Every structure is written in structure tokens, then in C-alpha cells.
Image (cartoon, helix red, strand yellow):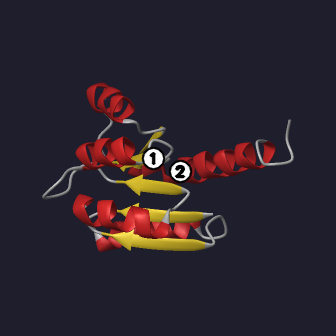
Amino acid sequence: MKLLIVDDSEEMRGEIRSIVAGIASVVYECANGPDALAMYPVHRPDWVLMDIVMEPIDGLEATRLLISSFPDAKIAIVTSYDDDYLREAAHAAGARAYVMKENLLELRRVLEGAADSDRKLGPDST
């Protein structure tokens, strides 16, 4: 599985990278929305792990822009904000998951579940 971690904190990118070790075969990283928009078409990751609060484009807008160009992109919001409005906004933007940074093991479960689903829906399935 190829992942793109988008977070303005290098330390947080490192923590996420450690959590996804063993699940991800390749991990790309960047620090903001514009870089994510540039990297996605080049690397075509299976999942984008997107922070919300970043400059100059926040994670919700970057998610909207990615989904508008790549409707099949899988994006998980990874944030410190446990807020119903933001959850709804993330879903409306096209994110498939919303995970709290305080519970990164949940991120691992989301990705493992997605990998299992993808295997079940692979080319040999009916």
C-alpha cells in the first residue's frame, strides 16, 4: 500500500509513519495542501492521510480539490480536532475517514480494513 502523509508537523509525520509501518510499502510525505495536490498525480497513493490545519490551503480544501480531480482518491483526515462540524465538512469534501491524532492506532485499523476490503474486491472477485 502506498501512502501520502500530509501534515505541516515533521514530528507528526514521523509518528504517523511509525504507526503505518508494516502496512505501507511506500510512504510519501509533504507539509501542505499545494504539495499534496502536486504529489498525488505523480505517485498515485492508495491513501492520503491529511491534516486539517495547514497553510496556505487547509486539509479540507485540499481534500475537495483532490477529489474534484481524482474522484476515486481515498483520503483520511488525521486531526487533533474532535468536532462534529469538521467531521461533516470532511465527509462533504470527500474524505472517507476521520481519525484523531490522539488515537493513531485507529488509523492503522482504518487502513488495515481498507486493505482487506480491497483484497476482497480485487480482480478475482465476482
**Would you place residue 125 above or below residue 26 in this image?**
above
> What's under tag 2, amino acid-wise?
Leu
Residue 107's disc number: 2
Q: Position of residue 117 (x, y in %)?
A: 72, 42
Amino acid type, callout 1 = Ala
Q: Residue furthest front?
A: 69
Q: Write down the residue under mark 1.
A: 76
Name the residue at 53% across, 70% down. Answer: 18
Depth check, front residue: 87 or 28: 28
**Callout 2 touching callout 1 (CB < 8 Å):** yes
Percent x, y for residue 38? Answer: 31, 66
Rendered residue at 55%/47% (across/down): 106
Q: Residue at x 67, y 51 (%)?
A: 112
Q: Residues within 10 Å of mark 1 (few under 14, many from 20)?
A: many
**Residue 33 pos. (x, y %):** 25, 58
Residue 63 is situated, as x and y percent measured from the top left of the image, at 33, 46
Could you tell whether 46 is left or right of 68 in the image? right
Q: Quadrant of the N terminus?
A: bottom right
